[in-house]
Amino acid sequence: MPDVPLSEPVVEVRGLRMAYGANEVLTGVDLRVDAGEVVCLLGPNGAGKTTTIEILEGFRVPSAGEVRVLGEDPARAGEAWRARVGVVLQSWRDHARWTPRRLLTQLGDYYAPYSTPERPRPYEVDWLLRTVGLTEHADRKIGALSGGQRRRLDVAVGIIGRPELLFLDEPTAGFDPQARRDFHDLVHRLSDLEGTTILLTTHDLAEAEKLADRILILTGGRIVADGSADELGRQVAGTAEVRWACGPERFVHPTTDVVAFVRRLFEEHGDELTDLEVRRASLEDTYLTMVQRSESGVPAGPVLEEATR
Ligand SMILES: Nc1ncnc2c1ncn2[C@@H]1O[C@H](COP(=O)(O)OP(=O)(O)OP(=O)(O)O)[C@@H](O)[C@H]1O
């Protein structure tokens, strides 16, 4: 079970701004993550996802705004707070001469004083190595691991302390399909069985759709969309597209009422229909359209015609 009362947000951000010199990256980000949620932060390259996550982790001090994570300001929070937070950064390149077992054991020792009866810390190292698929490589030098194996170790490092809140910045970059699936299972396990709250970034929209209870889209310095994949789809996709064939001829028609349209199609053409397909806006269509609209200042509205044009 989560250690934060369910009514209190685990992450709450209001009016967050961040500038690197003259480059204003975040211009007023508001977001909230509740206990036990898996939230996915999407956005184009350079949108400020890593910047946002690093501010929430306490690694970066924002230019302005209010940030509360597990009830504290991350920029001022102490070691006990840090022990409750797990972090998988975009890339680690250190401890090349150590072995995964040694690194995880050492890091685990750091978390042990913060163990509680509800949340015993750290995870057992052999269990964790097995869970991330590194048992065979547990005693090899970290510098000799492949990119994907190193990334699995990054994930293990992020969760060794049994965090209540886990930040994952592009966690599956470089994973092969099996490692990706194993990782998705791990996220479900952490979320469902451990009540871990998870905020992740990814460019893999199928991954976002699979993992996220809620998706946030960051572009132009702000969050422009917030909802489940289905909700976002419905917000922008008023129409579906019906494609069919009658003999050699093929047709495409956008409609807001698929069932009524298809029923009429069968009534009128019945036996002559040789193919039929209904296409709704995918998360990719929705995402691309929302980002394009935000960049060009166009308000929300149906997306499918634009996305499939
Ligand atoms: N330390 C820094 N100093 C100056 N500018 C920075 C720094 N870190 C990031 N930036 C700039 O801030 C902007 C946002 O970068 P950030 O890494 O947060 O984006 P992102 O959404 O995570 O991108 P990506 O999807 O490519 O990982 C970019 O224009 C980047 O060049």
Image (spheres, rainbow, N blue to C red):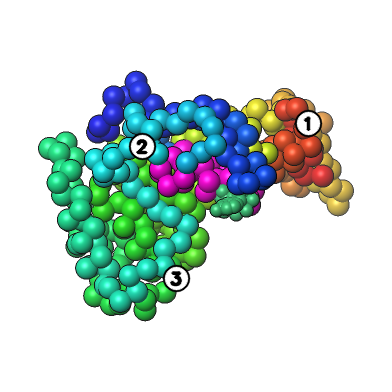
State the CA–CA distance, disc 1 to disc 3.
41 Å
Disc 1 residue type (three-letter): Val
- Residue 134 as seen in the image, left or right of residue 203: left
Q: Position of residue 220 (x, y in %)?
A: 68, 39
Check the picture and name the quadrant holding the N terminus: top left
| Of the two numbered discs 2 and 3 in the rendering, the one whose residue sits closer to the viewer | 2
For this rendering, which residue is in front, 288 or 256? 288
The local secondary structure at tag 1 comes to: loop
The answer to which of marks 1 and 3 sits earlier in the sequence is: 3
Q: Nearer the viewer, mark 2 or mark 1?
A: 2
Q: Residue furthest front?
A: 21
Mark 1 lies on residue = 298
Residue 236: image x %, image y %? 69, 30
* Residue type at the position of mark 3: Gly
- Local crowd at mark 2 within 10 Å, few (<14), some, or many (≥20)? few
For label 2, the residue is: 76
Q: Position of residue 298 (x, y in %)?
A: 78, 31
Residues under labels 2 and 3: Cα distance? Answer: 34 Å
Confirm whether residue 263 shows in the render.
Answer: no
- Looking at the rendering, the stretch of residues picked out in magenta corresponds to 39-60
Whether the magenta-drawn stretch holds residue 177 is answered as: no
